[in-house]
Image: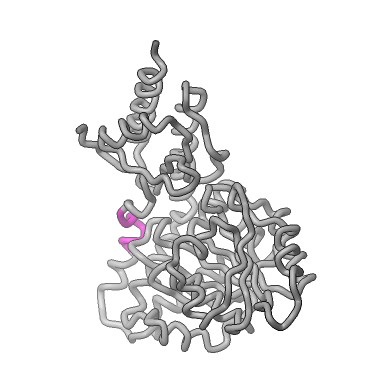
Amino acid sequence: MTTQPQQFASDNYAGICPEAWAAMCAANTASAPAYGDDEWTARAADAFRTLFETDCEVFFAFNGTAANSLALAALCQSYHSVICSSSSHVETDECGAPEFFSNGSKLLVAQSADGKLTPQAIRDLATSRSDIHFPKPRVVTITQPTETGQCYSIDEIQAISATCHDLGLKLHMDGARFAHACATLQCAPADITWRAGVDVLCFGGTKNGMAAGEAIVFFDTALATDFDYRCKQAGQLASKMRFLAAPWIGLFESGAWLRNAEHANRCAARLAAAVEGLPGVRLAFPVQANAVFLHVPHGILESLSARGWRFYTFIGGSARFMFAWDARFEGVDLLAEDIARLAVETTAP
């Protein structure tokens, strides 16, 4: 088995980027008040307000599951329901946490080949029943980019928001890779959030160069009432909050949040360009962010695995490769070369 210099199974494999690391080190030079009552947490929250060009309430959690689950719980009563895509992280990868923290709010799932929700799918689910025996639709959640690496355009988000408002629904955005969507769309963060009608965003830091940490950003600040208590009850109130908050300062003030995402996206595009058109190799989805999904014969997947490459096949059986801030072009090229070699060998007479 060949030892690979870098793996691309997940962008969670990456280390901490220098800008986030430096900010954590700076926050570590002296003691500071606990539980978020410190200058670093206040400064980080202000950095979000600057980035999004609006007043907003900002809270910091350890991971994406907690961020999504607590945000949705804040928008729902236990008898409400949340409309989501069939491949959404809240449906497939959070172990029932959204239902648990909301005390039972049901997820209403719309089938979607590419992970995107549409206004019509939302309307169909929200209006399918209105009797008291059915959980009342309350929230729509979309993932930006989706779990298949697709980005909602500004127009698509605005159309979804208009449908939500027409039906009296709130709009939540799971932005585990939000920075990568901004890099793809080349737009201001505000343009695909509050200006487009998003009420609450979960902004991912872990996949953008931080050690850990996500931010829950309430653009509709009335929805944030008592959210600090919800975080505490769920074990998400960090005693040394400055170490969750400070890395955001490093990312935002240096611009690394966007540079990291742009680089990861370029690596994904590089792999896609190198393997597209190879015999037996097909892109499962258009490459719009930092993910590449490949449909290839099972034998090639086995051979890639035997050569030491790691990947996941949990969406439609296609091999998923993810690229992070620290992905190296030479590693991407090595993966592409192995795929090309195996594709030729497999189809050779």
Looking at the image, residue 68 sits to the left or right of residue 169; the answer is left
Q: In this view, does 73 lie above or below 334?
A: below
Q: Residue at x 53, y 47 (%)?
A: 149
Dividing the picture into quadrants, the one containing residue 21 is bottom left
Which residue is found at the position 47% from the left and 70% from the top?
215
Q: In this view, does 209 lie above or below 275?
A: below
On the image, the x and y values in percent for residue 217 come to 55, 72
Find the magenta span and give its range. Answer: 15-22
Please give the name of the residue rendered at 61% of the width and 63% of the height, measured from the top-left corner: 109
State yes or no: residue 19 in magenta: yes
The reply to whether the magenta stretch includes residue 196 is no
Could you say which is closer to the camera, residue 339 or residue 30?
339
Question: Residue placed farthest to the right in the image?
Answer: 166
- Please state which of residues 44 and 72 is positioned toward the viewer in this rendering: 72
Which is more toward the observer, 88 or 299?
299
Is residue 230 visible in the rendered structure shown here? Answer: yes
Question: Quadrant of the image for the N terminus?
Answer: top left
Seen in the image, is 152 located left or right of residue 273? right
Residue 262 seen by the camera: no
Position of residue 59 measured from the top left corner of the image (x, y, whole percent):
48, 77
